[in-house]
Amino acid sequence: MTNYPATVAAFLAVLAGTSLVAVTARWFRRVDDLPTLEDWALAGRRFGAAVTWFLLGGTIYTAYTFAAVPGLVYGVGALGFFALPYTVIVYPLAFVLLPRLWRAAHEHGCVTVADYVKARYSSAPLALVVALTGILATMPYIALQLVGIRAVLSAGGLYPSDWVGDLALVAVFAVLAAATYRYGLRAPAVISLVKGAAIFGAVVGVIAVVLNRLGGAGRIFESAERNLPGGPGGPSLLLEPEMYPAFASLALGSALALLMYPHVLTAAFSAASARTLRKVTVALPVWTAVLGLFGLLGIAALAAGVEAPPGNAEAALPLLIQRLMPAALTGALFGALAVGALVPAAVMSIAAATLFVRNVYVEYFNPFATPKYQTRVAQWVSLTAKVGAVAFVLGLRNQDAINLQLLGGVWILQTFPSVALGLFTRWSHGRALLGGWLAGMVAGTLMVAWGGFSAVITLGVPAYAAVVALAINVVVTLVLTPFARSVPSSPPPVRPA
């Protein structure tokens, strides 16, 4: 355990305060109606602009994001800043897509995105693969939140190497699991208010100290350039022209994929109206500014001469904080980063559980389940997802979770034609979309696996594998649609003689 009692005390104080706040979810828009899955998973679609802004931002920006982006910049240089244009791209798309999707879901009584796909294309198989893809992409993402917490705590000396550290991690997650089980989406909504205040305050405080201690922005970049490892093909603070396609495709593909993740759509569906979502997406770029400041902390870690363990670049930020900040403030900042993992992990587990119950369990196993029973099953599935994530993290290497989450990004992007394009055109056919999805899934998985689990592959020029797979998906869909339309969906009725 760390030698700084003040650090430990501050860290525990932040987590204890967050746990107390989570309990207050029971009074957050409490209703006396019978329990329903819509009320548990979407809080009855009652959240206003302020709560939706905190919840959606807190869901999109995970704790691992705030540790991985500066770590990526620390490790690879300018290429790591692709996260900034990616979030700049995503919000105009969100402004157009999310309100239309919310309206369509509300009109048809859809709780999940797979519900919408089924209603839109009258295709149960297509809805099933969209639901299963969402669950597959979400599960490693939940585990990655725990990986982020453990990376931060390990780098800060707050994670013992034996079973005591694992037990502490389980205890932190258990509070979240209990609150989510009982109160559904209301629990992460309340915690997101704490997360927003903690993350915004943390980055402003760290940036102020870094600029003061390291001599200002100009000197930070000069020192960082000197401390970069040399050699051809090594990291650089200037993006080389040959990496432009990779940078652009990473930004575009990540933006398109983000809006398809079930946890993002669950947070969006909980808004009170499409108008509320439009207001929220206009203000979400504030979170991008915060992410940019975190990216700059990767540059600051280089300038400060931080030496992260090989293959563990995400430790650069915690090590920088530990080096420059007072002990008590260090513990508070580590606590803020840990809290940052709780919101997305909770929403992800809710989204995965809702997809399973609505589009697998009720659709194929128990179509007569009452709303109360559906809610109870979703609660247990959500709890099981969290337990599974803990077991995954404790039993496997961090790199396994990262590799699976990388594949999850490739997989979830293959649902984009089924979900997004259907909002604007009725030309595509369900069976053609199913064929395109299959082609994109197979191609994307093989490209990532053959490339050594790298997001960027080389096909003449470096490009994001998910975007290449999406292009294959769209082409197959376009080719198959005329044939699918020419085949009747059901046998024609027999005319009487």
Image: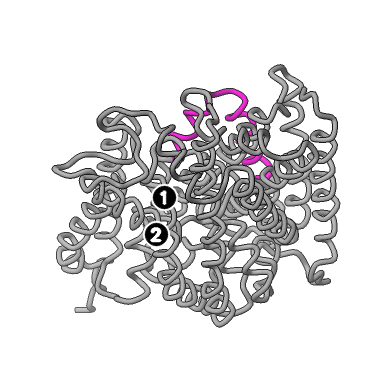
Tell me if residue 494 is in the magenta stretch. Answer: no
Left or right: 137 in relation to 20 = left
CA gap between label 2 and label 1 equals 8 Å
Specify the segment rendered in magenta: 381-405
Residue 327 percent location from the top left of the image: 78, 36
Residue 332 percent location from the top left of the image: 76, 44
Find out whether the residues at labels 2 and 1 contact each other: C-beta distance under 8 Å: yes
Q: Amino acid at mark 1?
A: Phe
Residue 206 percent location from the top left of the image: 65, 48
Q: Which quadrant is home to the N terminus?
A: top right
Q: Main secondary structure of the magenta part?
A: helix
The residue labelled by disc 2 is 85
Tell me if residue 387 is in the magenta stretch. Answer: yes
Tell me the residue at 85%/37% (across/down).
9
Q: Quadrant of residue 224?
A: top left
Tell me the residue at 46%/53% (across/down).
131
Residue 177 visible in the current orientation: no
Front in this rendered view, residue 367 or 434: 434
Decide: is 119 above or below 334.
Answer: below
Residue 41 visible in the current orientation: yes
Decide: is 89 above or below 236.
Answer: below
Callout 2 secondary element:
helix
Tell me the residue at 54%/24% (across/down).
396
